[in-house]
Image: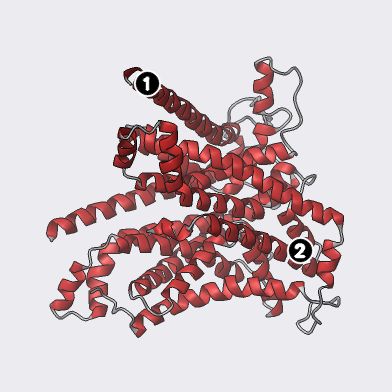
Amino acid sequence: MSSIRPGSAAAYWLAVPAGLWMFGAVVMPALLIVWVSLWGGRGFSTASPLTFENYIRFFSNPTYLNLIATTLRHAAMLMAITGVLGYCIAYFLVVKLKSARWRTALFLAFIIPFWTSALIRAIAWIPFLGVNGVINQGLMGLGVIDRPIEVFLFSRTGISMAQVSLYTLMASGPVVYMLSQIPMALREAAMTLKAPPGVVFWRIIFPLTLPGVVIGQVLVFLSVMADFATVQWIGGNKIALLPNLVMNFYEGAQLRGAAVVAVVLMLCMLVGVGLAMRVADIRRLGR
Amino acid sequence: MGALSIGWKTRSRVTGWLLGALTIGFLLYQWLPVFTLALLSFSGPTGGTTFPMNGVSLHWYRELWDASIMSDFKPPLLRSVMLAAACSLTTCILAVMAAQAMRGRFRGHNAFFYLLLLGIMAPGLLVGFGFALLARILEIEPAWNTTGFIVHVTWTLPFGFMTMLAIFNRFDSRLEEAALTLGATRIITFRRITLPIVLPGVLGAALFGFSLSYDEFPRSMFTTGADMTLPLAVMAQLDRQLTPELYAIGTATTLTSLLAILGCVAGLALLRRTQRLTTKGT
């Protein structure tokens, strides 16, 4: 018994404002994007005829097709890097680190930057990556190179470096949660039965953390696929991925073009999330 | 067997050290750019956007303070703070209502849960762009305090909602039962028993709402119209020219966020204390 009666009308009415808000400002706009992407003609009018012309124009341009492939490759690479890195960090924090005080301190050290503006953190990479940046000066100081390397700023390397720092926590967090749910007695039991540590990890620990890995990967995938800001600021205007194309079309007042790219992005994301759901039951995470 | 187990132990220890080194390395990797940014914001008037610093001064903070019309960050700052405060308040109210509704297990509460979760999963780029299209069809002029506000809440509300769900998960509903048994109505029980106990959690939801809206960029991009919020103003300035002034504003913003987190931590500590008191009471 609680201050709300189960299944009551009051519960329903309490949910209505938040539900309507989210429906009107998230679901409706998404459907709208799909609708606008099908508009024929030239003007922005709800009376436009519906055609697949915009899609045909988009998919018959090899540059755009390449861009889809590049974006997916970029996302896959980031998922691999943040996945491995995030898992190692989570494993260290939960399993290897014995001192509770250190664990709290390190957790905070990870989480605090996550709370500051992503924009500021992306900008912070500029003095780091530039021709006269910290990395180049450091490498020159160590005598590794004798003249600055230009690959960092305005390159995909620089973008990836910044994005790894932005998104590793997303890959790590759910794994931390899943790892901390595993009773340590389980490991000890396997060890007592003489399973080598590697086998314990691959046959027991890893499968139990799989939902966490998968949801972390989904979060990284969704973020990277939609991150136009880091790409724009670290990559300059030389490099663009699929989400930047939405911005470019939008700023060029080509709303139908922007809508087509947005739908392509949405489809990529839906397919990604769908695949992830097949690998592991994400809903188990909350239980 | 003995030799083997020692082998495992050493190996386990080596793995531990390796993973530890990796973790510390990543922490440095994550923090160094932010430190560099903060350090460079204190460079002298002739200092550039990279090392060397050319002296130490508060020059760029002063520039920030008496800014020219082109790069005056104070009006955007004011807008961002007001927007964040409004989002924070709205998030609080709607999140408490929504979480309380979830406790009531009304028909379709699962779909409702996923609908709110969608606000976290749906990328800002798509939500912002979609809402810009909606505003255009409805012939509404985008502005930070109308369309911007509506879209920001779709981002802050799910986080507040999750916070409240977590709080209600740990909530001892026997306290409510006691009040109800003693003849209090459900509304009075909620106001006098439930709400005071979950109040620290509500504070957490409020801070979430504030800091998420304050930093929000992709959703604002499409829906704020001519009067920019702070992140947009920073972006616009970055578009024109990168100066240590931006580093100064970055440092100032980061410090503000840090204070917000401290507030959150204090709120959670308060929650734990309240809960300890309530369990002692039962």
Horizontal and vertical percent position of residue A197 = 41, 32
Q: Chain of mark 1?
A: B
- Which numbered marker is on residue B4? 1
Task: Please tell me whether mark 1 or mark 2 is closer to you in this view.
Answer: 1
Q: How much space separates mark 1 and mark 2, taking CA atoms? A: 64 Å
* Residue B34 picture quarter: top right
Q: Front-most of A242 and A229?
A: A242
SS of the residue under disc 1:
helix
Q: Amino acid at mark 1?
A: Leu
- Residue at 23 percent of width and 77 percent of height: B188
Q: Is residue A119 above or below residue B193?
A: above
User: Residue B167: x percent and y percent?
Assistant: 32, 60
Q: Are marks 1 and 2 on the same chain?
A: no
Horizontal side of residue B195 vs B281, given as left or right: right
- Is residue A8 depicted above or below B68 in this figure? below
Left or right, A127 with respect to A51, comes to left
Q: Is residue A182 left or right of residue B42?
A: left
Q: Camera-side residue: A214 or B78? A: A214
Mark 2 neighbour class, 10 Å CA radius: few under 14, some 14 to 19, many 20 or more? some
Answer whether residue A134 is visible to the viewer in this image. Answer: yes
Circle 2: residue type: Tyr
Chain of the residue on which disc 2 is drawn: A
Residue furthest top in the image:
A143
Where residue A250 is drawn, which disc sits there? 2
Along the line of sight, the residue nearer the viewer: A74 or B261: A74
The residue at 58%/31% (across/down) is B57
Determine if residue B248 is in view. no
Do callouts 1 and 2 mark residues in contact (Cβ within 8 Å)? no
For the point 56% across and 33% down, the residue is: B29
B275 over B18 or under it: above or below: below
